[in-house]
Amino acid sequence: MAWLSALAGVDAWTVAMILVAAGFYAGALLAAGAVLFRLAFPDLPDPERRAASRTGAIAAWAAIVLAVIEWPLQAGYLGGGNGAAAVDPMLLGMVFEGAQGTQLILAVSGLLLVQAILLDARRLPGLGHGLSLGGVLLVMLAFVQVGHTVDEPRWLLGGLLVLHLLAAAFWIGSLWPLYRLAGHPPGGADAVRILDRFGRVAAFGVGLLVLAGVVLAALLLGGVTPLLTTGYGQFLIGKVLIVALLLLLAASNKWRLVPAFERGEPRAPQRLRRSIAMEIGLVGLVLLVTAILTTVSSPANG
């Protein structure tokens, strides 16, 4: 199969690049998503509000470290995949002066700014919200500097990717706060209010996520045949199947587990937390497949 061919030539250096890229995606989207979730739900209980902000800040620093690690990894890849090339000043300069360098600058700047959401603990909500939203925008712009969306029509491909990533970030950033809320006593007013409202907000976000992703894939692949015959297309199908499982879990949460939580059923918190934990695991798989798509495969050559 085409996807096996795409993986056949993967060496240890490329595996390291895939894992670091997946970790960077996870940290950057979690950091941005924590800001979006906080702003969408300003009435979070104080413990969850502080926990969401701390989680976003930790994720941001993890993503900054991984973004910096990607720099010598890219240089090493250009030099044949070895440690000597990774520290070669000429190769490091080539990477930094190119699109990867622009991405690094935007990503690090944005990830530093998203942590301004912590300022609201010091009674500076306006400043903190503004700076953190600016950080989210910079992080999104970092993602469109490299990869398959740099082709024409760049503005359309980049815009679709930003919409897709904003929806994904909101979903990813919501999982830990929702997991904590699901640990509250069933029927608790604060938890019920947030969980119920999240279901309504998420319906719009999921629609945006899927719509932007489908249109973006159609533009990149140019038809159904490459979806079935190229490695890129087959990896994309795998990603879509994992997202479908995520949507099934989300639907189960909204229509079955959250109502059970609202009714005060004793086992509802445990079941809801287990479902959210499964979502977290599936999100990790989606990000790993995404890293493979952007590292070892492309729409142009499969």
Image (cartoon, helix red, strand yellow):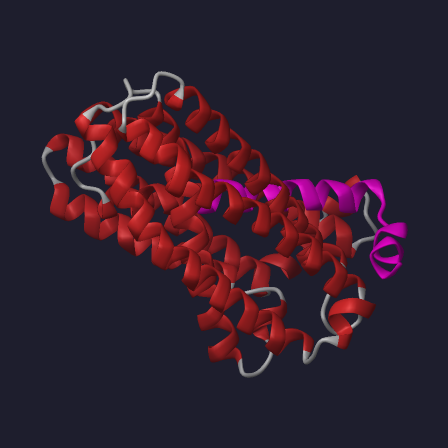
Instruction: State the count of labels.
Output: 0
**Residue at 49% from the left image edge and 35% from the top image edge:** 62
* x and y percentages locating residue 299 in the rendered image: 72, 70
Tell me which segment is drawn in magenta. 1-29
**Residue at 82% from the left image edge and 57% from the top image edge:** 3
Residue 141 appears anywhere in the view: no
**Residue 114, picture quadrant:** top left
**Residue at 44% from the left image edge and 48% from the top image edge:** 108
Pick the quarter of the image with the C terminus.
bottom right
Pick the quarter of the image with the N terminus.
bottom right
In this rendered view, identify the residue nearer to me: 156 or 197: 197
* x and y percentages locating residue 26 in the rendered image: 52, 42
Residue 58 appears anywhere in the view: yes
- Left or right: residue 131 versus residue 96 is left
Residue 9, magenta (yes or no): yes
**Residue 44, picture quadrant:** top left
* x and y percentages locating residue 21 in the rendered image: 62, 46
Q: Magenta span: helix, strand or loop, mainly?
A: helix
Residue furthest to the left: 123
**Residue at 40% from the left image edge and 33% from the top image edge:** 257
In this rendered view, identify the residue nearer to me: 173 or 214: 214
Residue 90, magenta (yes or no): no
- Left or right: residue 237 versus residue 174 is right
